[in-house]
């Protein structure tokens, strides 16, 4: 029995979900692309849309890495550590992008789901990489929890982006409707 035995089904489900959600996100972005262009939209996308794809990719990557039949925990511990460090850096970049973009003023929920929770998930992955040699089982559960958190963050953020664009688009359509003719 290997260290990673028993995790196959979990990571097949989580990895498949992440892959499917990446595809769905592309559909959403395509639909939103038909909306009127807003000044600074690229900044907003880098701060609010792109991170969802990155989180899904990380979940997919972790799922693939854990599914490889490694001989021991060393390689996977290094992968966890490096992935966590990358994620921490990326979460800080996203926070900075949120701060400097001018399309939308982030509220607490945005900071929570786009900066704080991803940062916590990536810290958990990095910590798991550091403790995997001495505490294998807890490290694997920590990465599993972080993967689920990232998956749910991506779902939340994608939904938030779609509803934001739909509400704004509907508002613009109402503003552009011709006024009813006054009765004479």
Image: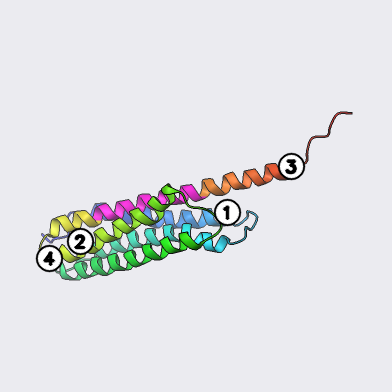
Between 57 and 117, the one lying in front of the other is 117
Q: Quadrant of residue 140?
A: bottom left
> How far apart are labels 4 and 1 at the CA level?
45 Å
Give the CA separation, mark 2 to mark 4. Answer: 9 Å
- What residue is pinned by disc 4? 133
| Crowd rating for badge 3 (residues with CA inside 10 Å; few <14, some 14–19, many 20+) | few
* Number of numbered markers: 4
Percent position of residue 114, x then y: 41, 55
Q: Is residue 78 above or below residue 39?
A: below
Residue assigned mark 2: 128
**Residue 49 shows in the view:** no
Of helix, strand and loop, which one carries label 3?
Answer: loop
Q: Residue at x 46, y 49 (%)?
A: 107
Majority secondary structure in the magenta region: helix
Please report the bounds of the magenta region as a residue range. Answer: 144-161
Based on the picture, tell me whether residue 155 belongs to the magenta stretch.
yes
Quarter of the image where the C terminus is located: top right
Position in image of residue 60 (x %, y %): 34, 60
Are the residues flagged by discs 1 and 3 in contact, CB closer than 8 Å? no
What residue does disc 3 label?
177
Give yes or no for contact between labels 2 and 4 (Cβ–Cβ under 8 Å): no
What residue is disc 1 on?
Answer: 32
Q: Are marks 4 and 3 in contact (CB under 8 Å)?
A: no
In the depicted view, which residue is nearer to us: 166 or 111? 111
């Amino acid at each position: 029995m290997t260290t990673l035995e028993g995790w196959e089904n979990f990571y097949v489900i989580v990895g498949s979900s992440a892959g499917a959600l990446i595809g769905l996100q592309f559909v959403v972005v395509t639909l939103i692309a038909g909306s009127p262009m807003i000044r600074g939209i690229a900044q907003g996308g880098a701060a609010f849309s792109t991170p969802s794809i990155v989180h899904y990719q990380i979940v997919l990557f972790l799922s693939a890495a854990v599914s490889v039949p490694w001989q021991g925990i060393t390689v996977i511990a290094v992968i966890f550590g490096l992935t966590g460090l990358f994620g921490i850096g990326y979460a800080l970049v996203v926070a900075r992008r949120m701060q400097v973009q001018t399309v939308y003023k982030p509220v607490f929920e945005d900071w929570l789901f786009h900066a704080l929770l991803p940062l916590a998930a990536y810290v958990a992955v990095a910590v798991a990489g550091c403790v995997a040699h001495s505490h294998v089982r807890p490290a694997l559960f920590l990465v599993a929890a972080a993967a689920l958190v990232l998956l749910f963050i991506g779902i939340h953020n994608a939904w938030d982006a779609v509803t934001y664009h739909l509400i704004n688009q509907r508002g613009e359509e109402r503003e552009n409707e011709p006024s009813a003719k006054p009765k004479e």
